[in-house]
Amino acid sequence: MKTKILIYDDDADILFLSKTILSKHGFEVTTRTRCEDILNELKSFQPHIVLMDLSIPTDGGEKHVQIAKQNPDTRKLPVLIFSARRELQSICERIEADGWIEKPFEIQTLVDVIKSHIPDGVN
């Protein structure tokens, strides 16, 4: 089974680039430019990892990460902040994200960080 990644980002170029890179590395990638009902989207797609931009419309990425982390069905799902904002470590700690990928990113860093968060039993 391929590792399924769900990426939320309001920048279509970042989504295209990220999906292209990650697909070439064997991941199954779905992208969204908005995040309005994260719990239903997670239930529908069933990703193994989520990348969340902090500036995603409508309510911002921080709120959606918190919603996912407070729900017992999605609490253990690795959620990585995907942002150019400063102080990503403190934001991650505050909202219980599992890590971050700073934009702009190096291709190998993107792949390595994602691989380090793949749950056991998933390829």
Image (cartoon, rainbow, N blue to C red):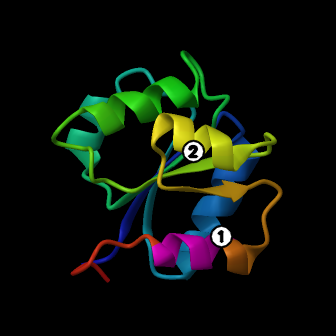
Quarter of the image with the N terminus is bottom left
Label 2: state its secondary structure: helix
Mark whose residue sits in front, 1 or 2? 2
Among numbered discs 1 and 2, the one appearing first in the sequence: 2
Q: Tell me what residue is drawn at x 48 percent, y 77 percent.
A: 116
Residue drawn at point x = 54 percent, y = 29 percent: 62
Residue at (48% x, 24% y) in the render: 63
Give the residue pinned by disc 2. 92
Q: Position of residue 103 (x, y in %)?
A: 78, 54
Question: Type of residue at label 1?
Answer: Leu
Location of residue 68 in the rendering, given as x and y in whole percent from the top left corner: 33, 36
Give left or right: position of 98 versus 45. right
Give the residue at mark 1: 110
**Closer to the camera, 75 or 34?**
75
Residue 34 visible, this orientation: no
Q: Which residues are magenta?
A: 110-116
The quarter in which the C terminus is drawn is: bottom left
Q: Regarding mark 1 in the picture, which secondary structure is present there?
A: helix
Give how far across and how far down residue 115 sits, in percent. 49, 78
Is residue 13 among the parts visible in the rendering? yes
Task: Check whether the beta carbons of the residues at disc 1 and disc 2 lie within 8 A of each other.
Answer: no
Q: Which of the numbered marks, if any, corresponds to residue 83? A: none
In the picture as drawn, the residue positioned furthest to the top comes out as: 58
Residue at figure coordinates x 78%, y 64% from the top left:
105
Which amino acid is tagged 2? Cys
Residue 5, compared with residue 88, is above or below; it is: below
Q: Which image quadrant is residue 18 in?
A: bottom right
Q: Is residue 52 magenta?
A: no
- Majority secondary structure in the magenta region: helix
Q: Is residue 114 magenta?
A: yes
Alpha carbon of mark 1 to alpha carbon of mark 2: how far?
17 Å
